[in-house]
Amino acid sequence: MTEMQCDVAIVGAAVAGGALAAALRTSGLRTVIIEAQPKIPVINRGDQLAPPIVAYLDSIGLLPYFEARGAGRVHLWRAYGPEGELLAEVDLRDILKPPYDYIMSLPHPEIHGSFMDAANDNDNVEVVRGARVTDLIRNDAGAVAGVVAKRGDTQIRINATVVAGCDGLRSAVREMAGISTDIQYYDEFPMITATRHPDQGGDVNWEAWTPRGFLGVYPISKKYVRCPVQAESGELTRWREIGFDHVKQELAEKFPWFEKMQIIDEGLHVYKSSRHNADTYVADGTVLIGEAAHTTPPFYGFGMAMAIRDGREAAKQIAHCIGLGDVSAAALKPYEDRVVDYNLWATGVSTMYRDVATGMFPSAGELQTALHEKPALDPAIMSRLYGDW
């Protein structure tokens, strides 16, 4: 058995874990990140970060890591309705002050990589990959005091003052800590990578809210876009059965934009949207961050933002509690209190957006009625999403 000592054991090296490690950079706390994947996986989802995140990353010295990996800038957002009409257009340069007047675009694995680049440059952080957490260590009082992980045939005991569950929707830390949640699943979205449409600028997000479903077209590089497509359950399996040439034809008939886009037949996967909020984000010696604590339908694109915001607030409370020598649930709970209302609100408005954007309304009039009842395009919502940081 290998044994390690640290102040904070972060389980999960994706956005939530990376954000927490980044927020702890100047705390002086010894941090170990434990990740089951031996290398950063190819994931076709979550490729854009909103303006307040860009500002925050710059404030803690991380923005150069993202720019070094080729981060792009998106300034415009356009949504088109059932009859091809322009529903709304937002130019962020008209409503936000520079230099943070853009959405940062970068393929999701590169976002992971940017956080890990920063972690690897910090002498207080050690990243242990290919190790799966199998148990929590508890002290004599029953509080969590570390994790046990297994890498190959080697068992690793990591003693820690605080364990952070950043291990996603099916969080092992949440389960082993005895924290309950109720996960609800929503739409399935096959995630497609394609060449950018010749009429779409490299700094423009497109969305189509059509009678045949929702389509997003989001730049992830100078050449490519990521396209979530609203689909029935099992659609990706059917696609593989009928062959990709038929899939391309179907998509072009359903969404004419694809007639001028080359679809890349690599790395296709389904993003199954979900919604949950854990009964609590804390236990004795334990915090939950990001999807381990909550998930939201992906509309408004604020899932990663919520995880990064969690990481910022959790880092403050962890450092404070370790300094006091008290990491009980009661001492850690101010972290939860600072983020939970915002998380629930953001999840609620994202669900409202989802109800309208995926409603498959047959006419512009019916869509406008739905928007009146559920004001998904309300500027006040965007103002709070971007401003409550």
Image (cartoon, rainbow, N blue to C red):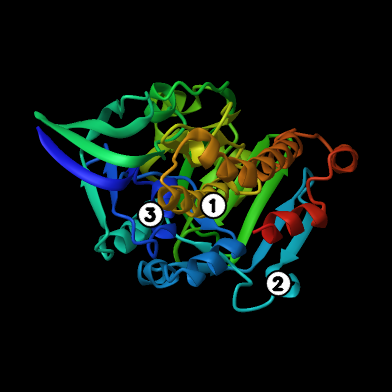
> Residue 279, located in which quarter of the rendered image?
top right
Relative to 262, is 78 on the left or the right? right
Query: Type of residue at label 1?
Result: Glu
Ranked by sequence position, the earlier of labels 3 and 1 is 3
Total residue callouts: 3
Q: Mark 3 points at which residue?
A: 21
Q: Mark 1 points at which residue?
A: 313
Q: Tags 1 and 2 in contact by the CB under 8 Å rule?
A: no
Query: Type of residue at label 3?
Result: Ala
Q: Label 1: few (<14), some or many (≥20) within 10 Å? A: some
Name the image quarter holding the N terminus: top left
Q: Position of residue 177 (x, y in %)?
A: 42, 25
Q: What is the distance, in whole Å, between disc 3 and disc 1 at their CAs?
A: 12 Å
Q: What is the distance, in whole Å, between disc 2 and disc 3 at their CAs?
A: 28 Å
Ranked by sequence position, the earlier of labels 1 and 2 is 2
Find numbered disc 1 in the image and state the secondary structure of the residue it sits on. Answer: helix
Find numbered disc 3 in the image and state the secondary structure of the residue it sits on. Answer: helix
Q: Name the residue under label 2.
A: 96
Q: Which residue is drawn at 37% across and 53% down?
A: 112
